[in-house]
Each structure stands twice: as C-alpha cells, then as structure tokens.
Image: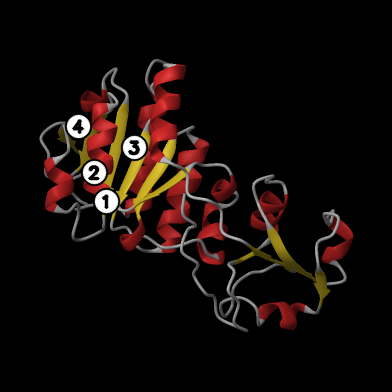
C-alpha cells in the first residue's frame, strides 16, 4: 500500500505534515498507527500533555509555533510533525463489511478538493459510524494540518481509502453488495426512500460541478435531500452530515 501524498504547510519547510491544535494533536498522539517526527510545545502546554517516550520535543512561544503552521491557524500551543498514515485498502473494508453483516455506509467523494470540507465530512462520518471514506488520489487533498483540525480527531479514527481509479473502486463497491446512491438535487427520489434497508454507498460530488459522468454512470440510484425550494443546494460537508445522519437513523 502506498503512502498518502504529503501537503506542505506554510512556515519553515517540512517533508512531513504538521498537525496543530489541542484536539487534533491529542488524537494523533493516541493513535497507535501514527509515527511521530517532532512535537512543538509552549512551556504552558508542555504541562498538560503526556509526551511519548523518545519523541523529539522543541519548545517555543506562541509566535514560534505560529511560524510552523498556516497564517492565523489556531495552534493552541500544540504542533505535531508526523508521517502520513497509510491508505487503507478498499478490499479490506469490503471484506469487513461482508463479515460483520451490518449496513453502515461507505461515503465516496468525487473531486471534493477543499481540505476544510473533507475534514468536516470525516468528522461527520466518524460521528455517525460510517464504515470508510473513499477518495481519488488526484482529486482530493492530502493529509494536512488544515484537514486534521477540521476533522477534529476523525482523521485518526476513520478508515480512509485513497484509490487511483474512482470508477473502478465504485465497481468493486457495487460488486460487494453496496447500493450506490449519488446525491443530486435534481433527482426525483428523496434519500430516505432510496436507502430503505440497503447497505448504502453515499456518493457526493464537488460543489458546483457535481459528480463526473463516469461516477454518475456507476450510481445505482440518484437521490436528493428534502431541502426547501428557497435554497438551491447545501455546502457539501453539510449535505454529507445530513445524509450520514439519515443513514444512521434507519431502524431506530
């Protein structure tokens, strides 16, 4: 399995992602799959974190840490330089789905490139117990501090499959028994009816452009959210949160 692409942050150059903010850093430190490179702390924040044995730590003031992250990023006195997590193999996710027999959804993003949106979708996916997130390597952000902070710890929890060919991945998902539902505001059927008792794969496209033609062709059904006609659409992360909530509510 290949490593995820690394996104460089502002500030002094690094070949590794920098995660910042208390919640994101603590979640990373608690993840046994993480490989740490360096931890940056202020004297105050050093008093409230358990530093793993052997981890290189550098101290500075708020301004020093601010130079390591994007301008005005709320680092809260915590910056952690890490190696990117391994991409999860989609075949493992599908095998687990077959073995455990529940109908938790997979969520697929087609060309959603804003790391804030991807991170927020990860947070909702983890909150509503989704099975995995699937994105395409070339059309999705890499692991970064912005994404990690938006995910609020979910980056360390949610299986993330980064695939070379999204159309082929959707073929595999369909062959594994998932009902592939593309969210589209022009669809005639509402999402709740489309999901019914299926094992859903929820597919969302980029804002404005929507899903690509090859992605739409692989949807078993298109469905819409029941929003008011006063609004044309929702932000993709809000739409994902509502869809994931609807999937989690089935059978309750």
**Residue most extreme to the front:** 1
Q: Residue at x 26, y 57 (%)?
A: 206
Mark 4 residue crowding within 10 angstroms, few (<14) / some (14–19) / many (20+): some
In the image, residue 251 lies at what x, y percent?
A: 39, 15
- Please say if the residues under marks 2 and 1 sit with CB atoms less than 8 Å apart: yes
Q: Which of the two discs, 3 and 4, labels the residue nearer the N terminus?
A: 4
Q: CA distance from mark 3 to mark 1?
A: 24 Å
Q: Which of the two discs, 3 and 2, labels the residue nearer the N terminus?
A: 2
Q: Residue at x 87, y 71 (%)?
A: 43
In the image, residue 132 lies at what x, y percent?
A: 43, 38
- Please say if the residues under marks 3 and 1 sit with CB atoms less than 8 Å apart: no
Tell me the colour scheme of the image.
Answer: secondary structure
Q: Which of the two discs, 1 and 4, labels the residue nearer the N terminus?
A: 1
| Residue 225 in sight | no
Q: Which of the two discs, 4 and 2, labels the residue nearer the N terminus?
A: 2
The circle drawn on residue 243 is 3
Mark 2 residue crowding within 10 angstroms, few (<14) / some (14–19) / many (20+): some
Q: Nearer the viewer, residue 28 or 251?
A: 28
Q: Residue at x 57, y 80 (%)?
A: 71
Q: How many marks?
A: 4
Residue annotated with mark 4:
190
- Please say if the residues under marks 3 and 2 sit with CB atoms less than 8 Å apart: no
Q: Which of the two discs, 3 and 1, labels the residue nearer the N terminus?
A: 1
Residue annotated with mark 2:
168
Q: CA distance from mark 4 to mark 2?
A: 26 Å
Mark 3 residue crowding within 10 angstroms, few (<14) / some (14–19) / many (20+): many
Residue annotated with mark 1:
165
In the image, residue 59 lies at what x, y percent?
A: 83, 75
């Amino acid at each position: 399995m290949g490593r995820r692409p690394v996104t460089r942050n502002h500030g002094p150059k690094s070949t590794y992602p920098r995660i910042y903010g208390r919640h994101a850093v603590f979640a990373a430190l608690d993840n046994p799959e993480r490989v740490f490179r360096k931890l940056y702390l202020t004297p105050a924040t050093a008093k409230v974190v358990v530093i793993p044995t052997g981890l290189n730590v550098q101290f500075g003031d708020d301004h020093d840490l601010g130079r390591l992250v994007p301008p005005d990023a709320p680092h809260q006195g915590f910056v952690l330089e890490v190696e990117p997590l391994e991409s999860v193999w989609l075949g493992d996710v599908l095998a687990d789905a077959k073995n455990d027999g529940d109908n938790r959804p997979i969520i697929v993003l087609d060309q959603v490139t804003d790391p804030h949106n991807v991170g927020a979708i990860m947070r909702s996916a983890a909150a509503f117990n989704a099975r995995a997130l699937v994105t395409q390597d070339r059309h999705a952000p890499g692991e970064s501090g912005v994404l990690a902070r938006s995910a609020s710890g979910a980056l360390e929890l949610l299986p993330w499959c980064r695939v070379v060919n999204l159309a082929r991945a959707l073929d595999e998902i369909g062959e594994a028994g998932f009902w592939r539902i593309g969210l589209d505001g022009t669809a005639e059927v509402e999402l709740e009816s489309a999901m019914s008792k299926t094992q859903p794969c929820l597919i969302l496209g980029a804002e404005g452009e929507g899903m690509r033609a090859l992605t739409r062709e692989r949807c078993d059904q298109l469905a819409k959210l029941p929003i008011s006609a006063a609004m044309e659409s929702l932000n993709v992360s809000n739409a994902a949160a509502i869809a994931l909530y609807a999937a989690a509510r089935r059978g309750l």
